[in-house]
Amino acid sequence: MNSAKAEPLPLVAVIMGSDSDLTTMKPAIEVLQKFGITVEVRILSAHRTPLEMVQFGEEAQAKGIKVIIAGAGGAAHLPGMIASLTAIPVIGVPVQSKALNGVDSMYSILQMPGGIPVATVAIGGGLNAGLLAAQILATADSNIYKQVAAYRQSLHQEVTTKDKKLVDLGVKNYMSQMHNT
Ligand code: RP5
């Protein structure tokens, strides 16, 4: 008998149009895994693999996925197309493109027609997409809620520590330490 503990089924899917989007999406994957949330990660292109994208969108709810994070760049149709295929909440991540710095990606993801929403984060906002997905899950899971609250407390601590140091050292010394680290 295999005594290894089976990993829980993924609650969040992180999908992207290309492996070149992975760097942008990695912070979303990492923060979700840090909270103990299992993530399914896929490359699904609205333009290059449209049938696989449709299959994923149609099967996601039955698989138990609760939130989908979709990243894409340029003519970034993946988040909107996935949102059209399933009523699972979709968080769109505009990937910074070379030609237009991600403004093209942002408008492509943001300007959805009425009835089919995509919650769009900032250009390159993988981390916030992961956190938002965790916060959606936290509405029904007090353990995840506690972890998100602890994460925020760590941000608070980081800033108050910096503030104290700035007040103690003064601007000049603080900045010279900043440049040496
Ligand atoms: C989009 O085209 C992808 O999401 C990616 O951001 C962009 C460029 O893809 P590659 O040419 O790097 O594969 O579909």
Image: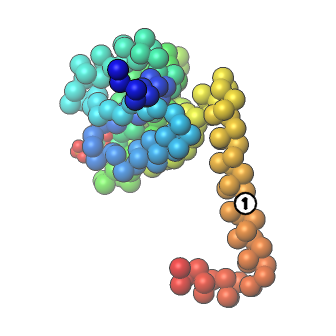
Left or right, 74 with reference to 125 = left
Q: Position of residue 51 (x, y in %)?
A: 23, 19
Q: Which residue, given by chain and number where applicable, does mark 1 sit on?
A: 157
Of residues 87 and 62, the one nearer the viewer is 62
The answer to whether residue 154 of the structure is visible from this angle is yes
Q: Residue at x 67, y 88 (%)?
A: 173
Q: Residue at x 53, y 16 (%)?
A: 115
SS type, badge 1:
helix
When the figure is inspected, residue 130 is found, relative to residue 102, above or below; the finding is above
Q: Residue at x 41, y 44 (%)?
A: 25
Q: Position of residue 113 (x, y in %)?
A: 48, 22
How many marks do you count on the picture? 1
View quadrant of ligand 1: top left
Q: Position of residue 47 (x, y in %)?
A: 24, 29
Of residues 131 and 90, the one nearer the viewer is 131
Residue furthest out toward the front: 1
Q: Quadrant of the N terminus?
A: top left
Q: Alpha-carbon neighbours of circle 1 within 10 Å: few (<14), some, or many (≥20)? A: few
Left or right, 73 with reference to 109 = left
Residue 62's image quarter? top left
When the figure is inspected, residue 116 is found, relative to residue 38, above or below; the finding is above
The answer to whether residue 76 of the structure is visible from this angle is no
Of residues 7 and 178, the one nearer the viewer is 7
Left or right, 36 with reference to 49 = right
Q: Residue at x 53, y 37 (%)?
A: 36
Q: Within 8 Å of ligand 1, the CB of disc 1?
A: no
Residue 86's image quarter? top left
When the figure is inspected, residue 121 is found, relative to residue 2, above or below; the finding is below
Residue furthest out toward the left: 48
Instruction: Give the residue type at disc 1.
Output: Gln
Q: Position of residue 81 (x, y in %)?
A: 37, 23
Q: Tell me how the rendering is colored.
A: rainbow
